[in-house]
Amino acid sequence: MNGIETILSRKSVREFSDREISKADIKTILTAGMSGPTAVNMRPFEFIVTQKTSILKKISEANGPYSGPLMKAKLGILVCGDTDKGYLGKEGYWQIDCAIAAQNMILAANALGIGSVWLGTYPEKAKYSALQKLFSLKSNVIPFATLAFGYPLDNTSEIRDLYEVEKVHTDKW
């Protein structure tokens, strides 16, 4: 699958098969996450990675009712931002850097035939605080995105055209 096909065929997958994800594919997914741009190359992201069902269940419970896909996932990645490493310690930059990392991981997974879904965490304080407590994180390490991965039960793939001309403003609003 080429890069454009990878982007245009990405979809949120919430039902996964029992097929395990290889260590090599996990490394590829994480490498993609670490390959995106960050403000002044500060790289404030950190990743908690698990394939353990018991830990996936705890993450799901801490992250709230819409995190059920973790219960069937074969891999969970919690993208965290170290606010001490964010550009100038200013609010906003570390979140963008972590979002880019999360999106890159989702796209890499799609290119590998692995499904994924982004389960919201930040900016909901109850969610990220519960995850900080679960993993005994320092106050400067904020859980940002909870990602579930696995081979999709429905393995259909289609290129979707989501282009909306009314959202494009050329030279003026």
Image (spheres, grey):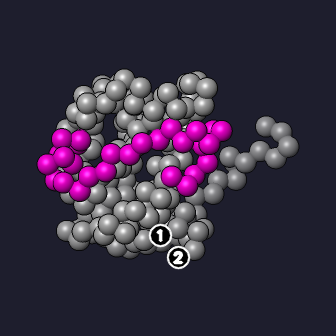
Report the residue that reaches farthest toward the right: 171
Position of the C terminus, as image quadrant, is: top right
Q: Residue 5, image x and y in percent?
A: 56, 70
Check disc 1 and give the amino acid type.
Ala
Circle on res. 111: 1
Report the residue that reaches farthest toward the bottom: 1
Residue 19 image-quadrant placement:
bottom left
Q: Residue 74, image x and y in percent?
A: 25, 60
Residue 172 against residue 36 in the figure, above or below: above
| Residue 157 shown left or right of residue 90 in the figure | left
- All told, the count of numbered labels is 2
Q: Residue 139, image x and y in percent?
A: 36, 23
Crowd class of label 2 (few under 14; some 14 to 19; many from 20; radius 10 Å):
few
Residue 48 image-quadrant placement:
top left
Q: Residue 42, image x and y in percent?
A: 58, 39
Q: Sequence-wise, which precedes: disc 1 or disc 2?
A: 2
Check disc 2 and give the amino acid type.
Met
Look at the image and say whether residue 65 sits in the magenta stretch: no
| Image point (61%, 48%), residue name | 37
Crowd class of label 1 (few under 14; some 14 to 19; many from 20; radius 10 Å):
some
In the foreground, 123 or 34 = 34
Q: Are the residues tagged 1 and 2 within 8 Å (C-beta)?
A: yes
Disc 2 on helix, strand or loop? loop
Look at the image and say whether residue 43 sits in the magenta stretch: yes
Distance of label 1 from label 2 (alpha carbons): 6 Å
Which range is magenta?
34-60
| Image point (45%, 33%), residue name | 82
Q: Is residue 115 visible?
A: no
Circle on res. 131: none
| Residue 147 shown left or right of residue 38 in the figure | left
The residue beneath circle 2 is 1
| Image point (38%, 46%), residue name | 47
